[in-house]
């Protein structure tokens, strides 16, 4: 398998792709209206910001709409291998994107993220840092090791020299957040953006930079897309200033 280098979008290339996508005459939607509907497979941690991004993109690209299928990145890769119809994919790590390199065009990193500790309001277990996650009886919830957030969490705990025994390992990071919000867990490791989206439903504790991991979010057009020009335009748009403003407002770091 050939592994493609993942890079941030460059200005000139981005402009060329956007022009090509907007100038396409291939808006051949199945509903016969002349509109194009794109399906984008996206990491669960992008749920809130991408819902808003779809509206912004549609306003800027008449006749093109975007619908998302959100799941853990490992689930997205499985869907691609199974041939699920879609036009583009955005994962929460480069490793997953590289695992489907033969199924995509050249990826581009559109955002970065980092993990934090979250607890329910009131923090009943008194968790404040990574070492507290090892205390006896703590109901710790993590993402499963095959999920990017799970792998990042394992790396962070290894760096800190903390051994933990989670009570569950969830299929995506949003499931981790949900258990903490509902009080079904005393603590969890989630992305900073997920913690921000939960507002006052959780308490957030940062992880020191020397122990943390920076997550990269690459986006790519799928080779099987029936709307490759429009899909390329969307991927390119994710690197434009309007998209970066949305990502930054949601707590993501941009390239």
Image: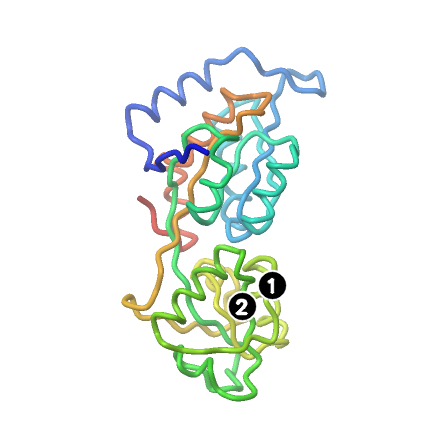
**Among all residues in the image, which is located at the extreme top?**
25
Determine which quarter of the picture holds residue 180: bottom right
Which residue occupies 41% across, 22% down? 18
Residue that badge 2 annotates: 142
Q: 23 above or below 203? A: above
Percent coordinates x, y for residue 2 in the rendering: 42, 32
Which residue occupies 52% across, 21% down? 228
Q: Quick one: SS at disc 2?
A: strand
Percent coordinates x, y for residue 240 in the rendering: 36, 34
Q: 151 above or below 206? A: above
Percent coordinates x, y for residue 76 in the rendering: 58, 43
Which residue occupies 51% across, 49% down? 46
Classify the position of the C terminus by image quarter: top left
Is 174 placed left or right of 217 in the picture?
right
Is 142 placed left or right of 249 in the picture?
right
Give the distance between the C-alpha atoms of the residues marked 1 and 2, in whole angstroms: 6 Å
Q: Which mark is residue 145?
A: none
Q: Which mark is residue 170?
A: 1
For label 2, count other residues whose C-alpha is less than 10 Å away and answer few (under 14), some (14-19) or many (20+).
many
Q: Quick one: SS at disc 1?
A: strand
> In front here: 97 or 16?
97
Which residue occupies 45% across, 32% down? 235
Cβ–Cβ below 8 Å for labels 1 and 2?
yes
The scheme the figure's colours follow is rainbow
Q: 164 above or below 147? A: below
**Among all residues in the image, which is located at the extreme bottom?**
136
Percent coordinates x, y for residue 249 in the rendering: 40, 51
């Amino acid at each position: 398998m050939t592994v493609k280098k993942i890079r941030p979008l460059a200005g000139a290339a981005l402009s060329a792709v956007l022009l090509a996508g907007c100038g396409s005459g291939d808006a051949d939607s199945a509903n016969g209206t002349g509109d194009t509907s794109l399906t984008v497979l996206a990491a669960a941690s992008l749920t809130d910001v991408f819902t808003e991004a779809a509206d912004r993109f549609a306003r800027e690209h008449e006749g093109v709409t975007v619908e998302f299928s959100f799941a853990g990145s490992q689930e997205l890769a499985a869907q691609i291998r199974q041939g699920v119809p879609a036009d583009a994919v955005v994962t929460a790590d480069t490793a997953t994107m590289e695992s489907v390199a033969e199924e995509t065009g050249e990826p581009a990193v559109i955002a970065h993220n980092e993990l934090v500790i979250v607890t329910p309001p009131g923090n009943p277990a008194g968790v404040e840092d990574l070492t507290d996650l090892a205390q006896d009886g703590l109901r710790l919830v993590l993402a499963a090791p095959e999920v990017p957030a799970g792998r990042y969490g394992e790396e962070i705990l290894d760096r800190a020299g903390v051994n933990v025994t989670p009570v569950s390992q969830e299929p995506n990071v949003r499931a981790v957040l949900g258990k903490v919000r509902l009080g079904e867990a005393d603590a969890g490791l989630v992305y900073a953006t997920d913690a921000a989206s939960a507002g006052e439903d959780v308490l957030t504790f940062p992880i020191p930079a020397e122990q943390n991991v920076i997550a990269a979010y690459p986006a790519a057009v799928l080779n099987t897309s029936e709307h490759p020009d429009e899909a390329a335009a969307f991927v390119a748009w994710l690197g434009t200033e309007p998209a970066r403003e949305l990502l930054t407002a949601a707590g993501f770091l941009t390239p």
